[in-house]
Amino acid sequence: MTVLKTDEAAEKAGAPDAAVSAGSGKPRRFEFLYFALRNKKLLLGLSVVVLFVLFAVFGPLFVQHPMLNYYIPFRPPSSSFWFGTNYFGQDVFSEFVSGLRESLLVGLLGGCGATVIGMTLGFVSGYKGGLIDEALNVLCNIFLTMPVLVLLILVAGFLHHTSGLIEGILIACTTWTWSMRAIRAQTFSLVSRDFVGLARLSGEKSRQIIMREIAPNMSSYLLLVFILSFGGAILTAASLDYLGLGPTNGMSLGIMMQQASDWNSLQLHLWWWFVPPGAAITCIVGGLYLANVGLDEVFNPKLREL
Amino acid sequence: MRRYLVRKLIIYILTFFVAATIDWILPRLVSGNPISILLSKMSLQPGTYNATYKLYMNAFGFNRPWWKQYLTFWTALFHGNLGISIYQFPKPVTSVIADYVLFTLALLIPAILLAYFAGNRVGAMAARRKLLDNSVLPVSYLLTATAYPWLALLLAFLFAAGGIGHFFPISGGFSYGLLPSWNWTFIWSLVTHWFLPFLTLFLVAFGGWAIGMRNLIIYELESDYTHYLEALGAPTRLVRRYAYRNAVLPQLTGLALSLGMVVGGAVVTEVTFAYPGLGYLVFQAVGNNDYFLLQGIFLFIIAGVLIANFVIDIVYVIVDPRTRVGISGA
Amino acid sequence: MGLTVDHLQVCYRTLRGDVKAVDDVTFSIEDREIMGLAGESGCGKSTLGNSLVRMDVRMRQLGGHVELDGKELPISDSRAMRDFRFKEISIVPQYAMSALNPTRRVGRMVAELLKARGFDYKSALPELERRVKLVGLDADILKRYPIELSGGMKQRVVMVISTLLNPSLLIADEITSALDVSTQRAVGEMLLEFRDRNFVKTTMVITHDLSILAQVADTILVMYAGKLAEKAKADVVINNPLHPYTQLLISSLPDVGIRHDEHTLVGIPGRPPPLLNPPVGCRFRDRCPFAFDRCTDEPPFVEVKPGHSVACWLHADGALPSGGV
Ligand SMILES: Nc1ncnc2c1ncn2[C@@H]1O[C@H](COP(=O)(O)OP(=O)(O)O)[C@@H](O)[C@H]1O
Ligand code: SF4
Ligand SMILES: [Mg+2]
């Protein structure tokens, strides 16, 4: 998650973007599409992610061997078992399809949750300033310094039963700090601009000002934050699942790796059991990060390649 | 400067306080009494069970009012008493931790520092240099996008389990046949067991630093002071040196922020390689429902991360002159 | 000798096309001359100034050439330009307030810069300190970090650094814009002083604020939308401008010598045309009260009186025979 910019860098990189969006309304939307369609990083990253999402949605249609059926174990990938079979003789492909669905859902939940929490606190903190900001900032710093995974292990260790939903919520509740930092810094720099001051003077309610004046100017920024949170949540979930602290009943890419590791896939050279789930995670998260860089360039003219 | 450090210190103390409180509340929130779990492992006679149960409930203080328990908890904490481990009964949690902590430090400190320095160097070199950038950047992105468990499994498979060769042992902190002693055989055994877990942690972090540094350098190279230097005919060497120096500052902040992340990665990696560090221990504690050990390790790790954070803050103050001139009253 | 700029064309390359910020600009500055370059903000003044020192990666020279003291300046070859910078041609950039490395003490930065350029800081130090004092600062600011200095102090420090090697040409970009009135005057005095002490041979003072030029400039060049509008002796431009744009600029100044903000200049109704795909014909046509049918063609920049050149059809017929500038 070091990919997320630090306060300072975020403020630096974010500011020109905000300046552009503050100035012009309609032509900008058009311009966005214009540059978006020409940005190779964005297109490549996005297509990888979309490909996996489509695969997660339509994958079950291609599953020929239900996950709970048992066949001959240790079978390498072949035309009938695309990803081979595992230690127990289950079809790895069908595990992969269910695992991908679960991992994407948990990642989406965790990423959305973290963005929403971070956005709310970041807005309020940056907009209100003063004591409220101070308090929220301390809270943020507390969670920022805490080792998230260890905290999650602690929590999950005390819960006897976990589901994807709980996992997603837990991830959201512990990883919102990154988005809050970024959004707080961005809100600060926007609040100091004239148009917000005007809105304030004209006696608008805080919430209205935030919704009408600040949020639209930050929508691009929010998108970037969400993408990074999404990727981060997928990675965190994978580690949790791998430690056996994920959904108690169910399958996910992390659980596949856990089982592969527990049942000696390394020693037995059943690489087809643990390579696909991890590779999928790398592709999806890498695609998200790449799309993020591309979007950043689209929104932020200074970063565009020449 | 003093203000800056004091402020940080307050936040760290608060963090520890919150963490300790979470640590204390959690087991009391969930069903499943740690004492009964402890006793179920001791396979006692039914008659003695109840008596022992009471004894332990008393000893651990679970039958006192909650605020008394909380106070006792803090008093014990200040005395460095983290309770008794269930999984390695009746060893105190602190001494169990002591057995494992060195391995974790040996893994984390080199991995964090080397990844930081190497990532920064490589990232700085890649910035604004087409060829290098086009190779370093994609690799770095793939590395940061990789889940720790997968990289660990992959490296273990390729280099330890015979995917490519059996160059390294696949698990443990040193060979079973050896007794800890300071001879070359043992040290070599330590090093070979250490290498793959280290490499896992190193690689993932390396990618992040390289990307971060590259972006920061590009930002610095676009800044006004760089343009002025160039306008005065400064050679590229000087320009890049200044850019690097300034870009290191936000990276240092990032280093402090990344610690929690790396510790998480260490847990996963140690588990994969059965490397006897705190991460592995935490995993064992969860598996064995050893709540006291779990709580103890959590607090211990938090304390470690906070101390490391503070050390980085001090380094930051030393490296960034602006935090120092603050006191001389500009 | 001095500076000669001949049909210079510089653009910014953007994904949407070239922004021609300096379009066919020709002028010269004599030794010991202080030339003012004026015009609304966005008309290409900084681009012109910067292009003579250091081209941004986005900038391209499309044509023309530049000579300094009889030597051709390879302005689009950044590497070759390095030798000229600081020694022959120097700039006080528009962003002078943020031009100093925030993490280096001022003196240390100068030392490292001088060393990198093959000079010895020790032997330059007495002169550096003398000049720092000359601009009214204490010599120990060299031991300070930029954040410890006020805006005006930074501005003056940058002026001293930029002129330390006695360059032939100094480009001073908006050096008064961020300052209050009294500091502005002082900085203006400094420009004159630097010239009189031969710290610099020729000076180009870029500003959107004509009042400062009235104080320091010998000649004034007015730009509009990337093109030259008018050039003449300072008092002529201020008292008897010929170009309608200059006239509007001058008349929007209530009293020369008093500080004017950017918006007094923008007081002319309308906006300058976009430089990406500018309209054909006279670029001032949309806003010009005297525009007539001929203005759909581009007016040439010609000398209409000795030492007085204008690009306007109203005056084109009085052009002197040979178009020397
Ligand atoms: N990096 C850039 N990319 C594209 N256009 C630019 C860039 N920098 C400046 N411009 C354009 O070039 C024109 C001239 O800018 P500038 O030389 O800074 O004007 P001035 O100094 O007279 O205020 C402006 O219209 C501006 O929009
Ligand atoms: S050429 Fe025509 S439009 Fe242009 S300034 Fe002269 S009169 Fe006005
Ligand atoms: Mg300018």
Image: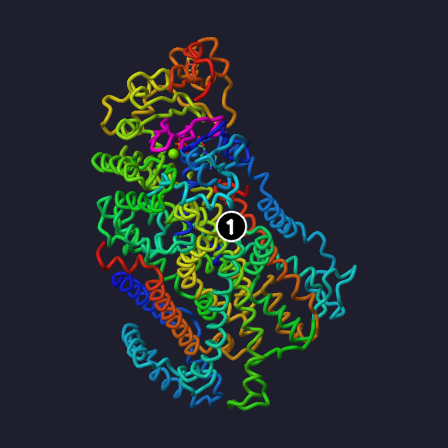
> Toward the viewer: C146 or B87?
C146
Q: Measuring 47% from the left and 89% from the top, which residue is drawn there?
A: B44
Task: Work out which quarter of the rendered image holds the C terminus of chain C and state it.
Answer: top left
Q: Can residue B280 be seen in the rendering of this structure?
A: yes
Q: Position of residue B187 (x, y in %)?
A: 54, 85
> Toward the viewer: B313 or C18?
C18
Q: Position of residue B111 (x, y in %)?
A: 50, 70
> Toward the viewer: B246 or A132?
B246
Residue C41 colored in magenta in the image: yes
Q: What are the residue bounds of the magenta stretch?
A: C20-45
Q: Position of residue C123 (x, y in %)?
A: 33, 55
Q: Is mark 1 on a helix, strand or loop?
A: helix
* Residue C263 versus residue B117 in the image, above or below: above
At label 1, the amino acid type is: Ile
**Residue B318 is drawn in which quadrant?**
bottom left
Marks counted in the figure total 1
